[in-house]
Amino acid sequence: MISKEEISAAYQLIQDEICAALEQLDGAAKFEEEKWEREGGGGGRTRIIQNGNILEKGGVNFSSVHGQLPLGVKKALNVEHDEFFATGVSIVIHPNHPMVPIIHMNIRYFEMPSADSENPVRWFGGGIDLTPHYVFEDDAKFFHQNLKSVCDQFNHDFYTRFKHWADDYFYIKHRNETRGIGGIFYDRLTATDTLSWETIFNFSQALGRSFIPTYVELVNRNRNKAFTEDHQNWQYQRRSRYTEFNLVYDAGTKFGLETNGRIESILMSLPPTAKWVYNYQAQPGSDEERTLGLLKKGINWA
């Protein structure tokens, strides 16, 4: 059986790889690291990059925490035990260029003891999704096809299942729009007769390592495009929707806050600048209106 220590070590390595590649991509900014300890057990490594050539603000965070579950989280997870262990890597990148998309990724593992000490309650979760300020269909297809390729290496049902899950999860109900063009999302993924723990763990690592080749390509496709002040204002408007989702609906944000996580690490997902324009209406026929028309569930990008 794969141990939680092995999983934690693998996730730290993925954090290292991604940080090194993002510094190379940006060409100027470097990550700042802050190691922290959680009151109650465990800790992590928060790494933040800011004010770069293309990366205005980003975080690539690792955590490995344990201790007692608060009652509210225990009820939300519908579990019986108080003790828990959780580890993972969480990434959010906000570029300074309105034609370059926001990207988010999370890979995580959760474990609790059970009556059978040799078989704890355990599961993997994670996902990756893209939030373009302007939706370019070729980029959307590239992104989703890459995710499908990763999923298909492990299970041919994964992409369809997890894509639908992402459409439902990354949905801003009060706006009646998706946060972006989706991606994949999964939770409580456990071993079955046809799906081993090793396969699930390898899938989690492969998804983590798909981040860099995918995002590097999307950044380099768009980083040299010209843009105007109007484009930048639209970017800030779209960032406001990202903020609303993370503060109102995001399960990871809620879990971190309710388990006494480190506030700066939890809220690193928020953009440095956002705008809320009262009753904004996109001009008919504009690129902004076209983007809004593509923020819908069920689009078959792959």
Image (cartoon, grey):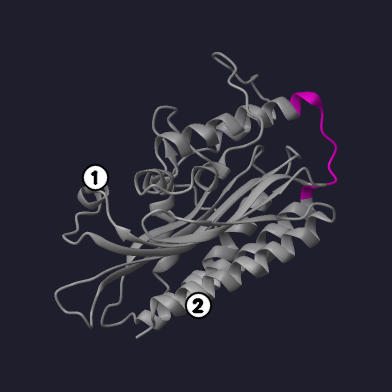
- Taking depth in this image into account, of 160 and 226 the one nearest to the observer is 226
Q: Residue at x 60, y 32 (%)?
A: 238
In the rendered view, would you say 253 is above or below 158? above
**Contact (CB < 8 A) between labels 1 and 2?**
no
Q: Residue at x 31, y 71 (%)?
A: 190
Q: Secondary structure at mark 2?
A: loop
Position in image of residue 276 (x %, y %): 58, 20
Can I make out residue 221 in this image?
yes
Residue placed furthest toward the top: 278
Gap in Å between the C-alphas at discs 1 and 2?
A: 37 Å
Position in image of residue 81 (x %, y %): 19, 62
Q: Residue at x 36, y 80 (%)?
A: 197
- Taking depth in this image into account, of 266 and 68 the one nearest to the observer is 68
In the image, which disc is placed on residue 216? none
- Can you tell which quarter of the image residue 61 is in? bottom right
Residue kind at label 2, given as amino acid type:
Gln
Residue kind at label 1, given as amino acid type:
Gly
Whether residue 195 is in magenta: the answer is no
Sequence-wise, which precedes: disc 1 or disc 2?
Answer: 1
Q: Which residues are magenta?
A: 222-231
Q: Secondary structure at mark 1?
A: helix
Residue 119 relative to residue 277: left or right: left
Between marks 1 and 2 in the image, the one whose residue lies nearer the viewer: 1
- Taking depth in this image into account, of 118 and 124 the one nearest to the observer is 118
Position in image of residue 154 (x %, y %): 45, 77
The residue that mark 2 highlights is: 153
In the rendered view, would you say 21 is above or below 72? below
Q: Residue at x 27, y 78 (%)?
A: 192
The residue that mark 1 highlights is: 72
Quadrant location, the N terminus: bottom left
Residue 294 relative to residue 257: left or right: right
